[in-house]
Image (cartoon, rainbow, N blue to C red):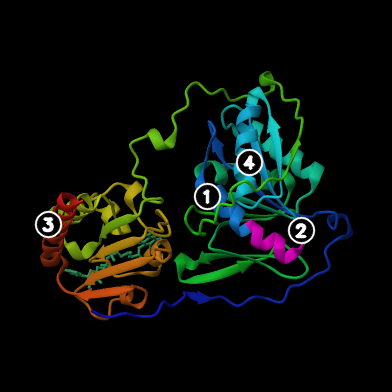
Amino acid sequence: MSEAPKQAPTQAGRANTKKELPEHLKAYKHVWVVIECEHGVVHPVSFELLGEGRKLADKRGVELAGVIIGSDKDVTAAVANECFEYGADLVYTVTDHALAHYRNEAYTKAMTDLVKTYKPEILLLGATTLGRDLAGSAATTLLTGLTADCTELAIDDEGSLAATRPTFGGSLLCTILTLNYRPQMATVRPRVLSMPTRQSGRRGRIIEHPLGLLEHDIVTKVLQFIADRESNKAQLAYVDIVVAGGLGLRSAENFQLVKALAEVLGAEYGGSRPLVQKGWITSDRQIGQTGRTIRPKLYIAAGISGAIQHRVGVEGADMIVAINTDPNAPIFDFAHLGIVVDAIRLLPALTEAFRKHLSVNRLAG
Ligand SMILES: Cc1cc2nc3c(=O)[nH]c(=O)nc-3n(C[C@H](O)[C@H](O)[C@H](O)COP(=O)(O)OP(=O)(O)OC[C@H]3O[C@@H](n4cnc5c(N)ncnc54)[C@H](O)[C@@H]3O)c2cc1C
């Protein structure tokens, strides 16, 4: 067993491209977070972004605002209170019957109308299906810059957002600045940022923004709404324990050992990208840069080498346990606990040990 320090991927150089912000853009102020809310349920990434937005706003000495787009005033008021408790100073709400379900055209209109009226300097969205769709169309409508799938956000004294994201297949991190356009837009994937502490009872201001949308002006119609959390897809991002396997397991049959351990631990199971390509797991269970980002309390990786594209998806885990036959495997550079052993032999023993331990505890409890 070995413990190794965490290492970051290589940071690309930052060009010195500072320029004076054009005069007409100096009116842009404050940090905004778009709150993703389906039927009154807020996507946790919105609160993660409020936590990060709070830090940026404090550094800049400006306010942090949430943006809630929806159709029911009672729901938006309740969600606004949640936003205050996660750090927002104020919340902009746009409520209209036409905004009951996400439709790109209507939400882009609501978003861009708000931005043109109140002029935020920074606009953050979750890199979810909805957030990616809305961010792209809002940025092109507003003719501003958008950095997608950021892993880190920082701000300098002049208010330039330094948005860092992986590039060249994840082997480098590049930092992108939007120097001559406002707002500076960025998306961040769920679980990349940590969840801020909720401050119960914290309150702020609500600004209601009228939009005047007409249903017959919107070309797309929603026939049925199926919430993602109700679908059959695995929800790896927000679970406490994830057990994953890689090519080191050698066969789909051996991968069942990962599933068995996950079942005993009440965990979700996942794997590296080649396993999706081989058809051993579905793509919703792929972990890494082009799969899910996870932040569990415990991550067990069996037969996974720890390539950079895998690493960026798991390094937020509290405890990473790596099982690998190669003592020089890259995963040992960032695992908290490394076990150099054949995973095909160890996994059944672990499953059995946990099964016994947990059933003894259940009986005792
Ligand atoms: C643009 C791009 C995006 C990508 N996105 C992702 C992504 O999101 N997620 C992802 O995972 N990958 C991604 N990849 C692929 C990534 O680069 C690696 O190829 C992949 O992660 C390797 O998977 P692996 O660790 O399962 O296999 P391998 O690299 O083949 O590693 C297998 C490991 O198992 C060990 N081993 C062998 N036998 C045993 C045994 N019996 N017991 C224990 N250990 C054993 C070996 O020592 C080795 O370290 C991406 C690549 C690119 C180019």
Which three-letter amino acid code belongs to the residue tagged 1?
A: Val
**Badge 1: residue crowd in 10 Å (few <14, some 14–19, many ≥20):** many
Residue 116 visible within the image? yes
Residue at (40%, 51%) from the top-left corner? 237
- Residue 278: give x, y in percent of width and height: 24, 53
Q: Which mark is residue 356?
A: 3
- Residue 128: give x, y in percent of width and height: 51, 46
**Badge 3: residue crowd in 10 Å (few <14, some 14–19, many ≥20):** few
Q: Which mark is residue 81?
A: 4
Is 34 one of the magenta-colored residues?
no
**109 over 247 or under it: above or below:** above
Circle 3 SS class: helix
Which three-letter amino acid code belongs to the residue tagged 4?
A: Asn
Q: Which residue corresponds to mark 1?
A: 45
**Disc 1 to disc 3, how far (Cα)?**
37 Å
**Disc 3 to disc 4, how far (Cα)?**
45 Å
Quadrant where the N terminus is found in the figure: bottom left
Circle 2 SS class: loop
- Compared across the picture, whether 97 is left or right of 346 comes to right
Q: Which mark is residue 62?
A: 2
